Image (cartoon, rainbow, N blue to C red):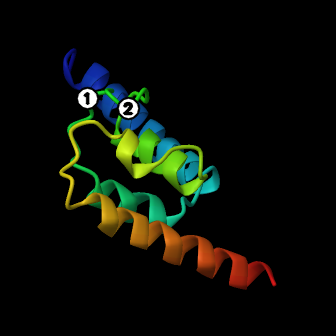
Amino acid sequence: MQIILPALVLAVLGFGLGVLINFVAKVFYVEEDPAIEEMVDLLPRYNCGACGHPGCKEMAIALLENKNKPADCKPIKKDQIPVIQEYLDNYFKNKKAKEN
């Protein structure tokens, strides 16, 4: 009985905290632009930091905010740059159309 009571208390505490974490995760959920993940998929995903950003996700965000150019990514293959630029052109065109 000496071992069952502490185990039961820990199990109830763990379950309660798990429910609390689940609730907080749903309440404070922040939806991201799906274009960020699509842009990350177009990048080489080395997370090398050669572009000046800590990873490819931050580079993708900078590209979508028009703060960087695809050529700023150092390890990217040269044939991938026009593909990314075309995606960005379509993204900005659609974004502008939604604003009007």
Instruction: Name which residue type carries label 2.
Output: Cys
Q: Does residue 68 sit above or below 4 in this rendering?
A: below
Q: Is residue 14 left or right of residue 61?
A: left
Which one is in front, 80 or 36?
A: 80
The quarter of the image holding the N terminus is: top left
Q: Is residue 35 left or right of residue 51?
A: right
- Residue positioned 46% across, 36% down in the render: 17
Instruction: Name which residue type carries label 1.
Output: Cys
Q: Does residue 80 sit above or below 21 in this rendering?
A: below
Packing grade of label 1 (10 A; few <14, some 14-19, many >=20) is: some
- Total marks placed: 2
Instruction: Indicate which label's residue lies in the foreground, 2 or 1.
Output: 2
Q: Residue 26 at x, y = what percent? A: 56, 56
Q: Which residue is mark 2?
A: 51
Which one is in front, 30 or 44?
A: 44
Q: Residue 86 at x, y = what percent? A: 41, 72
Q: Which residue is mark 1?
A: 48
Q: Which mark is residue 86?
A: none
Q: Residue 71 at x, y = what percent? A: 36, 46
Packing grade of label 2 (10 A; few <14, some 14-19, many >=20) is: some
Q: Is residue 57 left or right of residue 8?
A: right
Q: Residue 44 at x, y = what percent? A: 21, 48
Q: Give the image quarter of residue 29.
A: bottom right
- Residue positioned 31% across, 68% down in the render: 83
- Residue positioned 28% across, 52% down in the render: 43
Q: Does residue 39 sit above or below 92 in this rendering?
A: above
Mark 2 secondary-structure assignment: loop
- For the residues labelled 2 and 1, say whether their Cβ atoms are less than 8 Å apart: yes
Which one is in front, 40 or 89?
A: 89
- Residue positioned 45% across, 40% down in the render: 58
Q: Does residue 75 sit above or below 77 in this rendering?
A: above
Task: Specify the farthest residue to the right.
Answer: 100
